[in-house]
Image: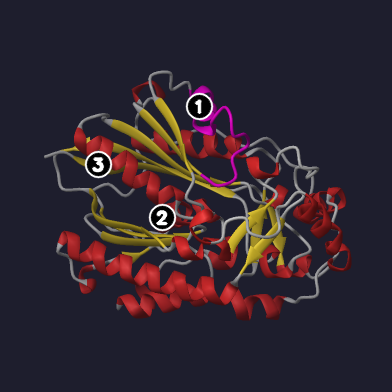
């Protein structure tokens, strides 16, 4: 039987750091308010397109695996913030890498996009459709963030990471997984202004309104990840006390702590990046995995638990068995171009271009969306 071992890993984080103090310069908030509610101190803001970050992370992952780009059979690009809808973003990474023999596809399940991509690519490797695959988790959220909405703008950041999967006869890679979705609650996390429903409706790019029901999202996220974890562990016959490390989606420290408690995983076995990077959506789990390896937290033969949830509301959990190697075979010289602007300067430039520049002006957006028929009834229940 074939398995899909993770043999390479790489990350790419833009250098510009947006701190809680930066956010407090234009929001009614403070470092203490944000930290006590989310566990976040800072996040990254990208000066380049998402494909650029993805390509750098991917080049580093390939070098880590000692695999040439032309040996790739498949590229899976997980994201909910693609640079373009057509052509897909995976093809952009293929061009950048020179991976001319690889198929290329995008997956969008919001924050779970990397993990769903891991399932899709892993299944193809195990079935023999492909032998070598690259799975990317990347987000460029800052351009379409509603920066004057405190409920969401303090949470998210930009970043990318990737892993290489290779066919193996050893029992490695994803041993058990469970995918699910609370579709009846999909309206609790929605970005209005993105997608074909808004085309030709007088809505400009970047003019977004975010629906974010924090309490309901919290409840569903904890329940969903806990249930998915229980099912994933049962599927591969592994007990909770056999988990060596949990690398969860980094949405919010309180959510992570609650999931760990319900799953029976002590916090000293949970790897955290939420304080430094915030919620990078599809990039959080792979970035955290790379940093866990860099920190020496992943040991040879380790059993790793990776639960996640995202808009939709998608949920999942993956049980991964690691191989013997926890250090890179090689290193890539790929780097992002230099950036001369601060994160706050870039965010303020985005804010200046938005129609709703302040909380008092946000009402200007509602008539525009209402006139287009996009405020009521878009996506509630089965008709969404």
Q: Is residue 99 left or right of residue 326?
A: right
Q: Quadrant of the C terminus?
A: bottom right
Alpha carbon of mark 2 to alpha carbon of mark 1: how far? 25 Å
Task: Report x, y in % for residue 364.
Answer: 86, 59
- Residue 186: x and y in percent read 52, 61
Is residue 291 in the magenta section?
Answer: no
Of the pair 122 and 247, the residue shown nearer to us: 122
Marks 3 & 2, CB-CB < 8 Å contact: no
Return the residue at label 2: 289
- SS label for mark 2: helix
Residue 109 located left or right of residue 190: left
Query: Crowding near pointer 3: few (<14 within 10 Å), some, many (20+)?
Result: many
Residue for point 45% across, 57% down: 288
Range of the magenta residues?
79-97
C-alpha separation, residue under disc 3 versus residue under disc 2: 17 Å
Badge count: 3
In this figure, which residue is indicated by the disc labeled 1? 91
Question: To which residue does mark 3 refer?
Answer: 4
**Residue 267 or residue 138, whichever sits in front:** 138
N-terminal of the pair, mark 2 or mark 1, is: 1
Name the quadrant containing residue 299. Answer: bottom left
Quarter-wise, where is residue 19 in the image? Answer: bottom right
Q: Nearer the viewer, mark 2 or mark 1?
A: 1
Q: Residue at x 63, y 46 (%)?
A: 140
Q: Is residue 265 visible?
A: no
């Amino acid at each position: 039987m074939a398995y899909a071992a993770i043999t390479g890993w790489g990350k790419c984080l833009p250098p510009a750091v947006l701190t809680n103090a930066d956010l407090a310069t234009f929001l009614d908030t403070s470092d203490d308010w944000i930290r006590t509610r989310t566990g976040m101190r800072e996040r990254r803001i990208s000066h380049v397109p998402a494909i650029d970050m993805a390509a750098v992370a991917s080049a580093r992952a390939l070098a880590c695996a000692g695999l040439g780009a032309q040996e790739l059979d498949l590229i899976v690009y997980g994201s909910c913030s693609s640079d373009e809808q057509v052509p897909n973003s995976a093809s952009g990474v293929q061009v950048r890498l020179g991976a001319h023999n690889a198929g290329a596809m995008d997956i969008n399940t919001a924050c779970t996009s990397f993990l769903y991509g891991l399932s899709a690519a892993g299944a193809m490797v195990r079935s023999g459709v492909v032998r070598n695959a690259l799975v990317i988790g990347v987000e460029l959220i800052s351009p379409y963030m509603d920066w004057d909405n405190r409920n969401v703008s303090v949470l998210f950041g930009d970043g990318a990471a990737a892993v290489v999967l290779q066919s193996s006869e050893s029992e490695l890679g994803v041993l058990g997984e469970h995918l699910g979705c609370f579709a009846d609650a999909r309206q609790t996390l929605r970005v209005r202004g993105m997608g074909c429903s808004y085309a030709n409706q007088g809505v400009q790019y970047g003019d977004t309104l975010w629906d974010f029901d924090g309490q309901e999202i919290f409840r569903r996220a904890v329940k969903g990840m806990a249930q998915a974890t229980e099912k994933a562990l049962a599927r591969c016959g592994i007990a909770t006390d056999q988990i060596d490390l949990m690398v969860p989606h980094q949405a919010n420290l309180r959510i992570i702590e609650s999931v760990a408690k319900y799953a029976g995983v002590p916090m000293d076995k949970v790897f955290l990046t939420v304080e430094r990077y915030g919620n990078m959506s599809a990039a959080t789990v792979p970035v955290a995995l790379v940093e866990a390896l860099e920190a020496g937290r992943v040991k040879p033969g380790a059993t790793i638990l990776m639960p996640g949830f995202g808009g939709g509301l998608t949920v999942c959990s993956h049980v991964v068995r690691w191989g013997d190697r926890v250090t890179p075979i090689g290193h890539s010289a790929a780097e992002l171009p230099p950036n001369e602007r601060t994160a706050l300067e870039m965010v303020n430039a985005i804010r200046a271009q938005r129609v709703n520049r302040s909380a008092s002006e946000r009402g200007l957006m509602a008539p525009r969306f209402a006139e287009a028929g996009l405020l009521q009834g878009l996506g509630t229940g089965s008709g969404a």
